[in-house]
Image (cartoon, helix red, strand yellow):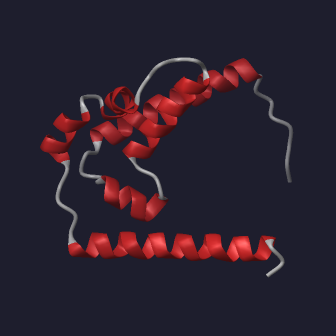
Amino acid sequence: MHTEDPVDPSTRTEIEAATFRRLVAHLGQHPEAQNIDLMILADFCRNCLAKWYSAEAGARGLDLDYDQARTVVYGMPYSEWKARFQQPATPEQLAAFEARRAAKAAKAAETAAGADGG
């Protein structure tokens, strides 16, 4: 059952911004959570957050490129984070990632076929 949101829009924005900051801080405290693992489990990673951040900045007329957004999300330049924390993907991770991508593509194709009445 859907109920009306009791939070006013300004407070909602503040809550969402604080939640984003907590998520970024949490990911910063857990570099062992590799991006490929996040992609396998949740279909997003730190790079996705940076892309969304950059896109939302651009939608508001701000010139914030992807590398600048990655610095916000990673808390340091991406190249530094990658050198310090990124581990090579294992064959198992790569296989799981490809399986997820294939399942996502199949679901998209199924959805498209359903939309076409196929």
Taking 31 as reference, is 10 above or below it? above
Q: Quadrant of the N terminus?
A: bottom right
Q: Residue furthest bottom?
A: 118
Q: Quadrant of the C terminus?
A: bottom right
Q: Position of residue 87 (x, y in %)?
A: 17, 56
- The front one of 42 and 14 is 42
Q: Quadrant of residue 106?
A: bottom right
- The front one of 118 and 53 is 118
**Count of labels shown?**
0
Please report the residue visible at 34 percent of the width from the left and 60 percent of the height from the top.
37
Q: Position of residue 104 (x, y in %)?
A: 54, 70
Q: Position of residue 14 (x, y in %)?
A: 61, 21
Residue 10 as seen in the image, left or right of residue 79: right
Residue 92 as seen in the image, left or right of residue 99: left
Q: Residue furthest left?
A: 83
Taking 77 as reference, is 44 above or below it? below
Please report the residue visible at 36 percent of the width from the left and 74 percent of the height from the top.
96
Taking 115 as reference, is 42 above or below it? above
